[in-house]
Amino acid sequence: MANPGKIGVPMMNLVRLKGVPILQQLHLEERLLRTSSHNWCIINDGTNQPTIVMGVSGKPAELLEIESVLCDQIPVMRRFTGGGTVLVDPGTIFVTFICNKDAVAGIQPYPQPIMSWSGALYNKVFQGIGDFHLRENDYVFGDRKFGGNAQSITKNRWIHHTSFLWDYEVRNMDYLKLPARVPEYRLARGHLEFICRMKDYLSRSEFINRTIEAAKTHFSLRSTDLEAIETTANTKFCPSTRLLTMQELEIAAKFASQSNVSLYQ
């Protein structure tokens, strides 16, 4: 029988995963956001292969070096939340909070209040480690980004999920174009001058443990596993996060090529 939790503190289910494919993770998150009435924290320590994940309105021709993506057969997907484009791989750690709108006292269910709450939570995680800040919508050490955020807000619930760059492959940054809209603090810096590795500051296990301890200051955590969630799955749910087809990427590549030609005419 599950513990009822501390009096006055909302219950949250904690799901710890390791190396789960990012598509499977995003399908799980979307289902829990839309069909569950519980609060959830999902931590996935790495994904199984390099994958590009765009926001719900992301356009491949504007965001990706599509010829390289096609040549190297890098999977590309469009997720159900907003935010920017990220290349995730085994060096990425994912942390997700899915909450009822009244789960956190004093937090209005709008993007900026949720972002500010998350910044305060991660201030506890990184206390005494590096020069941590929430800058615009990014988590940074100093002026270098290591955490990117995305959200979705429904009538009664919200999700805030983060991709943390514990480590990354330099060559993988070549698949991403410099986006047209960038944070002001980025200035004119390229990818490698803009980001940093969390592994230079703390271990994977220390980060995950600190995150769980910080979550405990807001919630009474109850561990559960993926199998238990899948057993009670709503089979009628159809997620919107999906892989882009080869045809879609080829069309985007053709569009990007035509746009480049017109620029130089």
Image (tube, grey):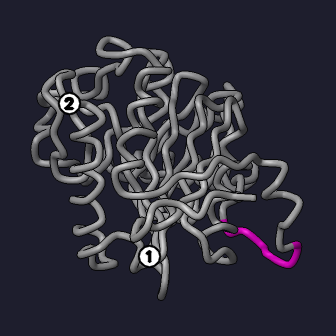
Q: Residue most toward the top?
A: 200
- Helix, strand or loop at label 2? It is loop
Q: Is residue 169 magenta?
A: no
Q: Which residue in the structure is indicated by mark 1?
A: 153
Label 2, label 1: how far apart the Cα atoms are:
29 Å
In the image shown, does 184 or 205 lie closer to the viewer? Answer: 205
Q: Is residue 230 left or right of residue 198?
A: right
Q: Quadrant of residue 83?
A: bottom left
Q: Which residue in the structure is indicated by mark 2?
A: 127
In the image shown, does 211 or 146 lie closer to the viewer? Answer: 211
Q: Is residue 218 above or below residue 49?
A: below
Give how far across and how far down residue 26 sits, in percent: 64, 54
Please name the amino acid that badge 1 sits on. Ile
Which residue: 21% across, 22% down?
A: 129
Q: Is residue 112 above or below residue 85?
A: below
Q: Is residue 114 above or below residue 211?
A: below
Q: Is residue 104 left or right of residue 52?
A: left
Give how far across and how far down residue 117 sits, in percent: 26, 59
Q: Earlier in the sequence, mark 2 or mark 1?
A: 2
- How many C-alpha atoms fall within 10 Å of the one at disc 2: few (<14), some, or many (≥20)? few
Please name the amino acid that badge 2 sits on. Gln
Which residue: 35% across, 43% down?
A: 214
Q: Is residue 63 above or below residue 208?
A: below
Magenta span: predominant SS is: loop
In the image shown, does 99 or 23 lie closer to the viewer? Answer: 99
The region drawn magenta spans 235-240
